[in-house]
Amino acid sequence: MLRPSQRRLAVTVALGVLLAPAIAHAAGDVSIVLTAHRVTVVDGKEVLGPAEQAHPGDVIEYRAEYKNEGAQPVKQLAATLPIPRGTEYLSKTALPQQLLASLDGRNFAPVPLRRRERLADGREVMREVPLSEYRSLRWTLGTLDARRSRAVTARVRVSPLQIAAVTR
C-alpha cells in the first residue's frame, strides 16, 4: 500500500509530465502556455492555487493559452488538452463548451462520447463512455488573428489510487 507521501509523489509526477512542456510551439507563429491550478473553496468562493502537489479528490483546472505571435492570421487552429491518467475530466467544466473528446488522443468525437455495447441477451445499445476514460479534449478555434490569444480550460478530479495486489 502506498503511503501518503508516495501518493503525493505519484500525483506530482503526473502533473509534472503534463506541465513539462509548459511552453510549446504549434504550427506557424502560435505559442502555447499550459498552466494548472488546484481549485479550492474558501469562504464559499473558488480560489485557484498552485498545483505542484495534488491529492486524490482534488480538482485541477488546466488552462492552455494559444497566442499568435506572427503578423498573419492562423487558420483552422485546433486546441488539444491531454487528460492525464489518474485524473477524470469533470463534465461541463470546459470552456469553450463546444468540444470534442478522445479515448486515445487520435480519434475525436463530440462530447459526450458514446459507444456500442452488447448486452447479455445479444442486443446492442449505445451508452455514454465514462468520463474517467477520456484522454484528450479538443476545441476547434478557427482563425486566430495576428497578435491575439485565445484560451481553453477544463477541470479534472484527481482519482483515488488503485493498488493492485501482487501474488507469487
Image: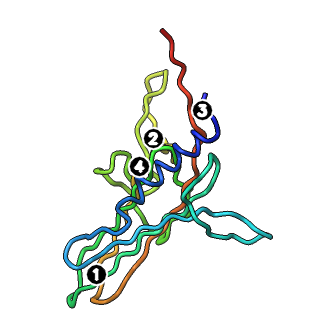
Q: Is residue 92 visible?
A: no
Quadrant position of residue 44: bottom right
Percent x, y for residue 21?
34, 62
Residue receiving disc 3: 2
Name above or below for residue 119 compared with residue 7.
above
Label 1: element kind: strand
Label 3: element kind: loop
Disc 4 crowd rating (10 Å Cα; few below 14, some 14-19, many 20+) is many
Residue receiving disc 1: 143
Precedes in sequence: disc 3 or disc 4 = 3
Label 2: element kind: strand
Find out whether the residues at labels 3 and 2 contact each other: C-beta distance under 8 Å.
no
* Mark in front: 2 vs 1: 1
Name above or below for residue 71 compared with residue 143.
below
Tell me the amino acid under the disc marked 1.
Thr
Find out whether the residues at labels 1 and 4 contact each other: C-beta distance under 8 Å.
no
Residue receiving disc 2: 126
Tell me the amino acid under the disc marked 2.
Met
Percent x, y for residue 157?
58, 52
